[in-house]
């Protein structure tokens, strides 16, 4: 199982990195749109929407994504108002999801599920594309943060995990794994601030505290995104969101932490750093 996961991850990573660095933003948005559509289809499946409705929802997601990317010009890095796109999804993840997880809610209705799906799937894709228009390295830095958190939580949890983080939602996750992810991402963010010229110019003195608080927030959000999808899968009675990716399940299973962290990271990036 682990070998299958690693093999799939290598193929996915290679394809993604090639697209990330070889394609201009307008073309890079096309494979991202495909991921958004697949994620929307799987979301509609979790919401128990009829098969025809799932395709319709995926088509709607592509249209909305394209309208924002090319119509609103979210790929223009000089437009600071792009940050407004991420205000509502950021509020959803920071304010609503923690309460949702604490209460263990399911989806109250299919219509609410589809509205929530828009907040979960589309802003993450938009964040990847709009940040790519600033620099592919910004996208890679943020995604690496999520990947490091995920990998550290997995291996630390397997090695020493004893205290369950959320046993009623995801029994395999532990507090030890979560704290291992926190330590790993803290080390990563400190290294980034020390070696990247763009960050080393900004992160000085008292700003180190703000910088590390933001990193801790993104760590917490990465866990929240993972747990949120796990809760919805449990309520839907399924183990994975899909079967497209061998050893990984569906697209949502791979981007669950990204859906929660990237929109907030994009909002903070545009508000604090801004475009060129």
Image (tube, rainbow, N blue to C red):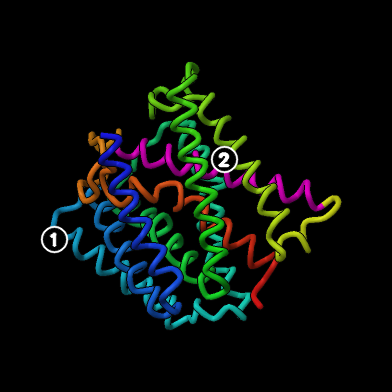
Q: Is residue 169 left or right of residue 193?
A: left
Residue for point 82% across, 55% down = 204
Q: Is residue 96 above or below residue 64?
A: above
- Residue 256 against residue 23 in the figure, above or below: above
Residue 63 at x, y percent in the picture: 32, 74
Characterize the local packing of mark 2: few (<14), some (14-19) or many (20 or more) Cα atoms within 10 angstroms.
many
Question: Which numbered tag is attached to residue 186?
Answer: none
Q: Which mark is residue 220?
A: 2
Horizontal and vertical percent position of residue 195: 70, 56
Is 24 situated left or right of 184 in this image?
Answer: left
Residue pointed to by mark 1: 52
Split into 4 quadrants, where in the image is the C terminus?
bottom right
Marks 2 and 1, how far apart at CA = 36 Å
The front one of 192 and 40 is 192
Q: Residue at x 53, y 24 (%)?
A: 176
Bounds of the magenta segment: 207-233
In the structure shown, which secondary structural element does the residue marked by tag 1 occupy? helix
Decide whether residue 215 is among the magenta residues: yes
Dot 2 or dot 1, earlier in sequence: 1
Where on the picture, by quarter, is residue 69? Answer: bottom left
Quadrant containing the N terminus in the rendered view: top left
Residue at 58% of width from left, 47% of height from top?
218
């Amino acid at each position: 199982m682990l070998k299958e996961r690693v093999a799939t991850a290598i193929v996915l990573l290679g394809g993604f990195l090639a697209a990330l660095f070889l394609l201009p933003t307008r073309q890079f948005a096309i494979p991202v749109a495909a991921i958004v559509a697949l994620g929307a289809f799987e979301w509609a499946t979790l919401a128990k929407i009829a098969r025809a409705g799932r395709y319709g929802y995926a088509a709607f997601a592509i249209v909305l994504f394209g309208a924002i990317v090319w119509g609103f010009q979210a790929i223009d890095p000089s437009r600071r108002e792009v940050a407004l796109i991420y205000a509502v999804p950021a509020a959803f993840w920071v304010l609503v999801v923690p309460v949702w997880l604490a209460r263990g809610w399911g989806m109250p209705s299919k219509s609410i599920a589809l509205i929530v799906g828009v907040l979960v799937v589309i802003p993450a894709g938009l964040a990847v594309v709009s940040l790519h228009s600033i620099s592919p390295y910004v996208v890679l830095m943020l995604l690496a943060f999520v990947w490091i958190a995920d990998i550290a939580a997995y291996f630390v949890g397997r090695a020493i995990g004893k205290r369950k983080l959320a046993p009623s939602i995801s029994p395999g996750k532990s507090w030890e794994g979560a704290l291992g992810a926190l330590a790993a991402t803290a080390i990563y963010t400190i290294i980034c601030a020390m070696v990247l010229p763009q960050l080393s110019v900004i992160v000085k003195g008292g700003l180190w505290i703000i910088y590390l608080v933001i990193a801790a927030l993104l760590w917490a959000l990465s866990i929240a995104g993972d747990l949120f999808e796990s809760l919805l899968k449990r309520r839907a009675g399924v183990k994975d969101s899909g079967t497209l990716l061998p050893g990984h399940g569906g697209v949502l299973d791979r981007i669950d932490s990204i859906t929660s962290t990237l929109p907030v990271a994009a909002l903070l990036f545009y508000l604090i750093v801004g475009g060129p």
